[in-house]
Amino acid sequence: MSIFRKRVPLEEGDYYITPEGYRCFTEQYHLKRGYCCESGCRHCPYGYDNKTNTQQ
């Protein structure tokens, strides 16, 4: 089993630049990627809660 995950190419609508200059991934990108990284992403469609370290 490989520990490396398949790289998903970025397309329009996958992210936006925040006022602070960071790249913020959208729900569209997370769904394309297909798994939760458990980093507490702003637009996580998997229901991960960074405060409780659980998924809903």
Image: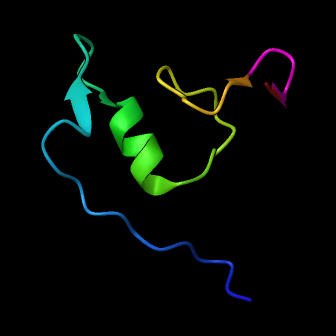
Q: Which colour scheme is used?
A: rainbow
User: Which residue lies at the image location 63% right of the left edge and 44% below the top edge?
Assistant: 36
Q: Residue furthest left?
A: 12
User: Which residue lies at the image location 59% right of the left edge and 77% below the top edge?
Assistant: 4
User: Which residue lies at the image location 64% right of the left edge and 35% below the top edge?
Assistant: 39
With respect to residue 10, does 54 lie above or below? above
Is 35 situated left or right of 53 in this image? left
Image position, residue 48 (x, y; %): 71, 27
With respect to residue 3, does 1 lie above or below? below
Is residue 12 covered in magenta? Answer: no
- Tally of numbered tags: 0
The kind of secondary structure the magenta stretch mainly shows is loop
Nearer-the-camera pick, 21 or 53: 53
Image position, residue 44 (x, y; %): 54, 28
With respect to residue 19, does 16 lie above or below? below
Q: Residue furthest top?
A: 19
Image position, residue 50 (x, y; %): 74, 22
Instruction: Choose top left, top right, bottom left or bottom right for residue 1.
Output: bottom right
User: Which residue lies at the image location 80% right of the left edge and 14% below the top edge?
Assistant: 51
Q: What is the quadrant of the C terminus in the image?
A: top right
Nearer-the-camera pick, 5 or 28: 28
Instruction: Choose top left, top right, bottom left or bottom right for residue 21.
Output: top left
Is residue 53 covered in magenta? Answer: yes
Query: Which region of the structure is painted magenta?
Result: 50-54
Is 7 situated left or right of 21 in this image? right
Is 17 situated left or right of 28 in this image? left
With respect to residue 4, does 10 lie above or below? above
